[in-house]
Image: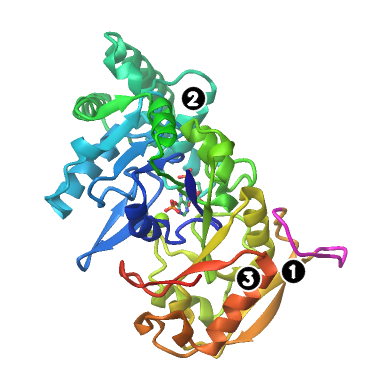
């Protein structure tokens, strides 16, 4: 099994890369997160953003698995499937989308509770995507949630109603304007019925059998290492395991079976939501990059915060996940800038320096190295040797610092706009 992970704070271009390489695999499997993800794919000049559906869905003959580590919002998934069929009529998701029986449901009240907590001053505001992700995962950990397999049991409706009513009673005590309980419940149950036509199975067994028969599995991460619940910039993180280890636990596959671990990183950094961001750019360079790179959340439409490439955090992410190959995206967006910066170290309050760190705080000072910028239409370049020298230097610097190759360079949003570098 190979793994694809985001190494920064999400939105590195995982969807595009997976869409491209999924032709080399028999199965793609999402292992974490849920509808908080937004994996954008361009096909025939049109763009679609996938949330819970694995990014291999466009490749005929590839089976797509929503794994056990995912939290599944039936209402959102139903919309996503219908939208996918409108986008491309030739896709028949019933035939190549499979759902883990052990994946947990996101209830509509989880989403309302997410909104409630984000607004209420008694809680820390995270800047979530308001998809009820933390609420579903926390109920899973509390052992109070229902899973996909429960939808086949005769008491599913009554057990779901118990959850919905309990949450609703709590919410009704606050000052939020709420949709009616009947409305959200019936939408939920209709969507659950819709999901019954998909194969809901023990995906651990399916995936392990596939591997032992020599079939190739690609694990798809959502979010990114710096948003990991344990290893990210807590508390401003998501609620799942986004690392390579998360792929193993989320899919039920032994670490012994892992091959390549592709880490995706942008040539700069972005972040949506709150939280520490040492290399954040506050001058006009940030605005230029945001506009050129269309850095607005594909899920929520929020403008993304922009920062220079953060090597201490990137080295940490590569270390924590054992990344074997780097996929560098959006270097084309920096084209035309006189100089571009890379943060090489953090200077701590006591003056000491750190070159690998996941311990980010407001008090660290990023030490920037300025490199000469490049000015070429990178998107038009079809072979690595034709890249501008300044970009080649940028890439070599990254490779020597990280100790892994930049195996692919994405040169534009289009499906074909990617160079294989090694
Ligand atoms: P993809 O897969 C970028 C961020 C949110 C917020 C924090 C917690 O497209 O890279 P949550 O809704 O998960 O409880 O929000 O995590 N976040 C993402 N940021 N890309 C994503 O997904 C994200 N998923 C969650 O903005 O800061
Ligand atoms: Mg995204």
- Side (left or right) of 229 relative to 199: right
Image vertical order of residue 153 relative to residue 168, above or below: above
Quadrant assignment, res 397: bottom right
Dot 1 lies on which element?
Answer: strand
Residue pictured at 73% horizontal, 60% vertical: 356
Residue 214: give x, y in percent of width and height. Answer: 41, 39
Callout 2–callout 1 Cβ contact below 8 Å: no
For the residue pair 228 and 374, the one nearer the viewer reads as 374
Question: How far is disc 3 from disc 1 in space, using C-alphas?
Answer: 16 Å
Q: Which dot, 2 or 3, sits closer to the camera?
A: 3
For the residue pair 58 and 126, the one nearer the viewer reads as 58
Residue reaching furthest to the left: 89
Identify the residue under disc 2: 140
On residue 146, the disc is: none
Can residue 122 be seen in the rendering of this structure? no
Identify the residue under disc 3: 399
- Side (left or right) of 288 relative to 231: left
Residue 87: give x, y in percent of width and height. Answer: 17, 54
Residue 80: give x, y in percent of width and height. Answer: 25, 44
Residue 336: give x, y in percent of width and height. Answer: 47, 88
Question: How far is disc 2 from disc 3 in space, using C-alphas?
Answer: 40 Å
Quadrant assignment, res 348: bottom right
Quadrant assignment, res 303: bottom left
Image vertical order of residue 108 relative to residue 144, above or below: below
Q: State whether the magenta stretch is mostly helix, strand or loop.
A: loop
Identify the residue under disc 1: 345
Can residue 419 be seen in the rendering of this structure? yes
Mark closest to the chain's N terminus, 2 or 1: 2
Residue pictured at 55% horizontal, 60% vertical: 325
């Amino acid at each position: 099994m190979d793994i694809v992970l985001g190494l920064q704070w999400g939105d590195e271009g995982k969807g595009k890369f997976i869409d491209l390489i999924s032709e080399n695999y028999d199965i793609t499997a999402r292992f974490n997160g849920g509808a908080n993800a937004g994996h954008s794919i361009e096909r025939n000049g049109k763009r679609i953003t996938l949330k819970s559906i694995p990014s291999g869905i466009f490749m005929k003959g590839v089976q797509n698995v929503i794994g056990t580590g995912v939290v599944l919002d039936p209402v959102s998934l139903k919309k996503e499937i219908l939208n996918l069929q409108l986008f491309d009529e030739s896709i028949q998701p019933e035939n190549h989308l499979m759902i883990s029986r052990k994946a947990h449901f996101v209830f509509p009240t989880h989403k309302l509770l997410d909104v409630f907590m984000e607004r209420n001053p008694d809680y820390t505001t995270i800047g979530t995507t308001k998809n009820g992700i933390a609420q579903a995962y926390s109920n899973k950990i509390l052992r109070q949630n229902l899973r996909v397999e429960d939808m086949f049991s005769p008491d599913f409706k009554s057990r779901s109603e118990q959850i919905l009513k309990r949450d609703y009673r709590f919410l009704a005590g606050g000052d939020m304007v709420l949709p009616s309980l009947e409305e959200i419940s019936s939408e939920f149950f209709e969507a659950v019925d819709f999901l019954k036509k998909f194969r809901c199975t023990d995906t651990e067994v399916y995936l392990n059998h596939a591997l032992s028969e020599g079939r190739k599995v690609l694990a798809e991460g959502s979010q990114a290492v710096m948003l990991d619940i344990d290893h990210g910039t807590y508390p401003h993180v998501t609620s799942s395991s986004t690392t390579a280890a998360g792929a193993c636990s989320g899919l039920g596959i032994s670490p012994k079976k892992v091959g390549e671990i592709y880490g995706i990183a942008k040539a700069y950094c972005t972040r949506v939501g709150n939280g520490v961001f040492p290399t954040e750019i506050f001058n006009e360079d940030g605005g230029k990059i945001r506009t050129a790179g269309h850095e607005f959340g594909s899920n929520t439409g929020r403008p993304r915060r922009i920062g220079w490439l953060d090597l201490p955090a990137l080295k940490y992410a590569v270390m924590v996940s054992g990344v074997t190959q780097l996929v560098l995206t959006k270097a084309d967006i920096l084209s035309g800038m006189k100089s571009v910066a890379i943060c090489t170290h953090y200077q701590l309050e006591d003056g000491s320096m750190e070159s690998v760190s996941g311990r980010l705080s407001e008090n660290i000072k990023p030490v920037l190295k300025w490199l000469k910028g490049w000015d070429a239409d990178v998107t038009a370049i079809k072979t690595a040797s034709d890249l501008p020298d300044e970009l080649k230097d940028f890439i070599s610097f990254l490779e020597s610092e990280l100790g892994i190759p930049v195996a692919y360079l994405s040169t534009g949003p289009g499906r074909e706009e990617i160079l294989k570098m090694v």
